[in-house]
Amino acid sequence: MKQGAVTSFDIAQAAGVSQATVSRALRGSSRVRPETRERILKIAREMNYYVNRSAANLRTQRSSTIALLLFDESTDHESEINPFFLNMLGSITTAAANLGYEVLVSFQQRSDDWHIQYEFSNRADGLLILGYGDYVTYRPKLEALAEAKANFIIWGPIIEDQPGHSVGCDNELGAFEAVTHLAGIGRRRIAFVGNASQHSPEFHARLLGYRRALGHAGLAERDELCVGADNTEESGIAAVEGLLGAGVEFDGLFAASDQIAIGAMRALQAGGLAIPRDVSVVGFDDIPRAASVTPALTTVQQNTRTAGKLLVTNLVKLIEGETVESTQMPPKLIVRKSCGAPPARNT
Amino acid sequence: MKQGAVTSFDIAQAAGVSQATVSRALRGSSRVRPETRERILKIAREMNYYVNRSAANLRTQRSSTIALLLFDESTDHESEINPFFLNMLGSITTAAANLGYEVLVSFQQRSDDWHIQYEFSNRADGLLILGYGDYVTYRPKLEALAEAKANFIIWGPIIEDQPGHSVGCDNELGAFEAVTHLAGIGRRRIAFVGNASQHSPEFHARLLGYRRALGHAGLAERDELCVGADNTEESGIAAVEGLLGAGVEFDGLFAASDQIAIGAMRALQAGGLAIPRDVSVVGFDDIPRAASVTPALTTVQQNTRTAGKLLVTNLVKLIEGETVESTQMPPKLIVRKSCGAPPARNT
DNA sequence: CTGAAAGCGCTTACAG
DNA sequence: CTGAAAGCGCTTACAG
């Protein structure tokens, strides 16, 4: 704080009222005479007075702050934050501001209990949790949070028995639509890149959608078409190089994320295959780059704007003691050039 | 805060010491016997105690928080935040965490004095300011900040008489290198897209670098080759459509930003021109998409990682009463396919 | 090395 | 509608 900053006592003196009245006027209490309030507000403005938040927070035991915690896979090295989360940041801050909350951003995760600290230290009234490296190590943190009765909302799928509430997108349905689209344009040997078992429930849900779509289209599941990948471009490259190296034949590829898909496209093109002529590719997320790569990537879009708003709204409800339901938002298939179908609705 | 949270008095009681000693032990004061400290720390851990930050902040008149203020041009509508700033966010939070600071993010700018509020309300010890819509309206805000003796560091160029300190990249030099490269591969009629006069000092510096490079290469400046544009893709499209519509001939194009360059490339390709065969294109910023477009965009890279670190380090120095110098970091030309030169150093 | 005490600047019951 | 007063949970001079 600026030293010598003016306090509510200074305003009180200038206005000829008690400090309590200044506080009431500033908070809009109905128990202050309108003219008195006006006079106080005017003086406060003139004297450049702002309520000291530390004092107010200490007194009210609230911070009017939300902590946005990013458990990102890539935190250590040249951390390129997952572009998908970055997109959500704008809508989260806007939504928070509209409800009178500030947003504290944290990527760090040095201590095991760092996520709990925020609430226990009165730094934040609630937490928004985006991303997780590995679900297996992430899950216990959620349990610790729930046990501490923290207010938190998770971005992610609805998972049986998972503590807390979440906002997510229907990953299974999005994958189903993506793969059904590939089947609909005549692709018969469709690979899935991004198998990550229980370490990533979202990818797993996308795998389930892939499988259901194959069944629905009367196509056989083949083990060799289902390969693992992390959420990175490099991983997508490696996966496709693996497929090509093993001589696996495929004419469609559904990647569990755009980053994987973009890597996959690189590897396909490097291997002399044309997209979409030889292989149709579909991704998931609709990150900004998806529309920029060549050919433009068909993908499943999650509405980050709505998502951010919903995350904040639900968290604030929790903070204010209301009940909240986990939500799944419908995904939307964005058809571009990478799968070779006539554009249904382009961006 | 969680109600019924444990306080330092609870720890004191459990440890059989005074509350003052608990506070000292937790802050690492040397005036606590080591064994006492250890015992207190252990009990604090067991009892899940965290220092109440509101109380500590009120007492110390510090918040150990940095506010990151984004004055973005596109805040109103479907605000896609400038991807360049988003990139910096990661390194800023990391650098801040390493120095013991949290980061509060704000895009809002509803009130005129919102930037000053942060410091006056003891929410933040200092401000990091990124981006500005229009320099003409932005400048007075900087003056207000300086007059209020706020601690703030600006991301941007060094500008004569500008209040405060800044960290930026040598825009003039970056532009000079970009355009010199275009001239070096034989381009003679090089357009500049992004003329914004004094409303954007960065773009203006890039224009100056463009001019110097033309002179250096013995090329004439031509008014019709220098067109205005905002920092958006649409603006880049419009600018090139204007050039093509007016029948202006050019074989090189330097855009004041990657977003403009990407729009320009779209418009060139839509107009039937091949890149780089007919026109070589260079951008500025090296946003993630620059490497993904086709052909990959040659551009001037600003090191966001170093930038973020420097911004935070300087701000913390300011907060701690040290003096600080404005800095310009050297830019780096990243040669890719869009200008048709043999790659010097690719990414 | 440790404790008792003051005080940071608010908000809000309580009393009028 | 307004004021006097308590107290939120710390940190830190002061005294020992």
Image (spheres, coloured by chain):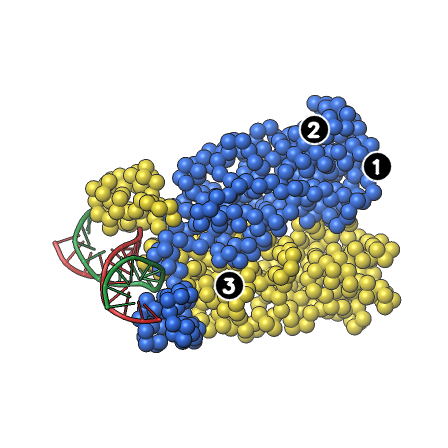
Chain colours: A blue, B yellow, C green, D red
Q: Can you see residue B183?
A: no
Cα–Cα span, label 1 and label 2: 25 Å
The numbered dot on residue B54 is: none
| Subunit of label 1 | A
Q: Where residue B272 appears, x then y in whole percent?
A: 87, 55
Mark 1 neighbour density, 10 Å: few (under 14) some (14–19) many (20 or more): few
Q: Is residue D8 or residue B304 the one in the foreground?
A: D8
| Subunit of label 2 | A
Image: A253 above or below B170: above
* Residue named by callout 1: A277
Amino acid at pointer 2:
Arg
Q: Is mark 3 on a helix, strand or loop?
A: strand
* Residue named by callout 2: A212
Q: In this view, does B334 lie to the left or right of B139?
A: right
Which residue corresponds to the image point at 60% horizontal and 44% vertical from the top-left? A82
Q: Is residue A122 left or right of residue A85?
A: left
